[in-house]
Amino acid sequence: MSALQNDTFLRALLRQPVPYTPVWIMRQAGRYLPEYNATRKRAGSFLGLAKNPDYATEVTLQPLARFPLDAAILFSDILTVPDAMGLGLYFVEGEGPKFERPLRDETAIRALRVPEPRESLGYVIDAVKQIRGALNGKVPLIGFSGSPYTLACYMVEGGGSDDFRNIKTLLYARPELLHHILDINAQAVIAYLNAQIEAGAQAVMVFDTWGGSLPAAAYREFSLAYMQRVIAGLHREWKGQTIPSIVFTKGGGLWLEDIAAIGSNAVGLDWTVDIGEARRRVGDKVALQGNLDPMVLFSPPAAIAQQVGRVLDAYGKGSGHVFNLGHGVSQFTPPEHVAALVEAVHSHSRRYH
Amino acid sequence: MSALQNDTFLRALLRQPVPYTPVWIMRQAGRYLPEYNATRKRAGSFLGLAKNPDYATEVTLQPLARFPLDAAILFSDILTVPDAMGLGLYFVEGEGPKFERPLRDETAIRALRVPEPRESLGYVIDAVKQIRGALNGKVPLIGFSGSPYTLACYMVEGGGSDDFRNIKTLLYARPELLHHILDINAQAVIAYLNAQIEAGAQAVMVFDTWGGSLPAAAYREFSLAYMQRVIAGLHREWKGQTIPSIVFTKGGGLWLEDIAAIGSNAVGLDWTVDIGEARRRVGDKVALQGNLDPMVLFSPPAAIAQQVGRVLDAYGKGSGHVFNLGHGVSQFTPPEHVAALVEAVHSHSRRYH
């Protein structure tokens, strides 16, 4: 494989000196880009896109052709793992992901098995290899998975939820059954992320989208403990290269000290946290990734540059910061505002390095 | 007016000794009660219920007839104030509140005026008087309002939102216009809550449902600062009685120290915060209200009692705790589980007093 031409992202995750703050954007390959929508149209559907390595490679590279981003992220979905477990992932336009066979009784829960990634998730592994080849060393490639708890939310609810009534009823009334699901999910996520690393992912990120909906004690027991198991099970090195890991709990700002202690190299922050305060709280344990409010991107470029400056100022001097939004970019974002964001991060951050 | 027979709620808010931890439940008069649904059917609609003092009195008292709750809360809606400003509140079944004339340009924003509560909100003031009379001293009556920022969210978005794109575009691109709205809203909320106090409300609560969607610095500037103005403008006493105040920012756990410093007597907590840790953080500055996960109420009574015990244990010994859920009770909650909650709070809390 080609030598890496831009390693600022990997160096920042490891808190090594960098000339400027690297930046990538959650959902950078997505619906705000007309070229993404065109490819999706050709693919016929979101799953048609995600399950075809050629299309997945094409859309992964699209934002890099437009913006000088410092990392690429595998185009896929966080729900590929439960789909491989046989739950039947499908999408209804405007309603988000759903499962045909959600976990609604003990029999279904006890029947869960850890999928072998090379068998049932081969399309993801192939996409990682193909994207890594197509990147040709331009920037590093990030692999990812949903967290065990976040996967369990979708598996039990059967889709998105605004109150998580089913999974929380399981949590409070039958905690041992939820632990069983989480145990299977943790094993599956470890195998899945390690397969991505073996296929070429140079860093990995665990998305805990729904851990923030839990009470503090339940978060530690049902989400964080399983992310800790995942991190402990990952390859720390592959072919002589260190593989940094990032964990991101949306709404996890209250628990940063705990999150920083599970062994990952970096912690993602949503936009509600002051990143300077977060840095004081976690000390030099981890790098931080984030955390501009995605809604800033609806302001004119001058306001975007000002808000980017605030985040950079709050983090302050030195390495250990990967700039990102605090959540995925909105599908309604003007692409030229993303360009303004990337430009502002690159130019304003040099003074801090 | 009759002498108050149960003042545990008011005493706990003022951190005075109590024999047990008082409890009330956000949205205790609501759709989980069949008798509420029957009254609402007679009233024809939610607004028909809220705008009629007879109906409002009837539903306010319903949960007190079922459960030995320690406080009543005025039945009303947080959006009565912008409705009185002429924005035209209406409800679409299953979609939540909407405004016919949301604030979508500078002309509309500059035309906003502070409503005189006795003129345009007379139905609320009448309801407070009538409920206070009907309670006949059984328990204290809580008045309430939305926070200036939360009202502004609905006024600018025209209804609920999952990204708050319109108000955040105003915030980042035209902050002076948002400050203008918030200034008007703060004046309106002060006049509205003081009118409720004059009509008989014995404590008041400010609901900041959406402040938690902001970055830390924006929360302080656009939500907390205006709640501080509201608290400073309220009657602290009325007819010789102290009128305690509660502020509640859903998702505000990161900023508890700041919230505890604005001058209110108590701070509401959502379920994500550990109440013991919250108590350590705010010290003896304020009482705390909360914070059981509303989803606990879908478990059997034994599990409810266990989770209630955890919250009481975490708070620990002494006064200064008003038990509540961390958010409104779900419409799907079995009423007998609310009975189990109230019973558990009353019986288990005596050991801490």
Image (cartoon, coloured by chain):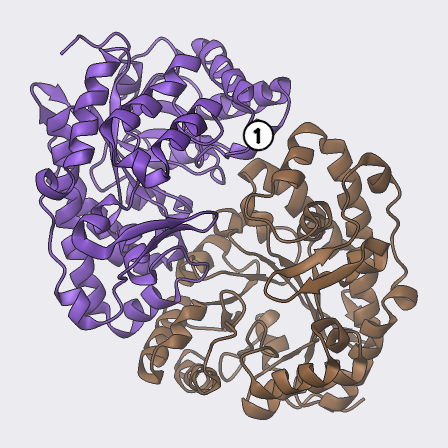
Chain colours: A brown, B purple
Residue in the image at 84% along x and 78% along y: A126
Q: Pick whichever, B250 or A31, lies toward us.
A: A31
Q: Is residue B290 left or right of residue A78?
A: left
Residue in the image at 60% along x and 56% along y: A209
Task: Inspect the image, locate mark 1, and give the three-letter code of the amino acid beneath it.
Answer: Val
Q: Pick whichever, A239 or A178, lies toward us.
A: A178
Residue B312 locus on image (x, y percent): 48, 21
Residue B198 visible (yes or no): yes
Where, quadrant-wise, is the C terminus of chain B in this rendering? top left
Q: Name the chain letter of the residue that bears numbered label 1.
A: B
Q: Is residue B35 left or right of residue A58?
A: left
Q: Is residue A317 left or right of residue B193?
A: right
Q: Which residue is mark 1?
A: B296
Regarding mark 1 in the picture, which secondary structure is present there? Answer: helix
Residue in the image at 37% along x and 39% along y: B45
Is residue A320 positioned above or below A228 on the image?
below
Residue B167 locus on image (x, y percent): 32, 64
Is residue B45 positioned above or below B9 on the image?
below
Q: Pick whichever, B309 or B67, lies toward us.
A: B67
Residue B21 locus on image (x, y percent): 39, 16
Quarter of the image for residue A90 reads bottom right
Residue B228 locus on image (x, y percent): 19, 45
Q: How many marks?
A: 1
Is residue A234 positioned above or below A342 on the image?
above
Residue B68 visible (yes or no): no
Where, quadrant-wise, is the N terminus of chain B in this rendering? top left
Q: Pick whichever, B221 or B178, lies toward us.
A: B178
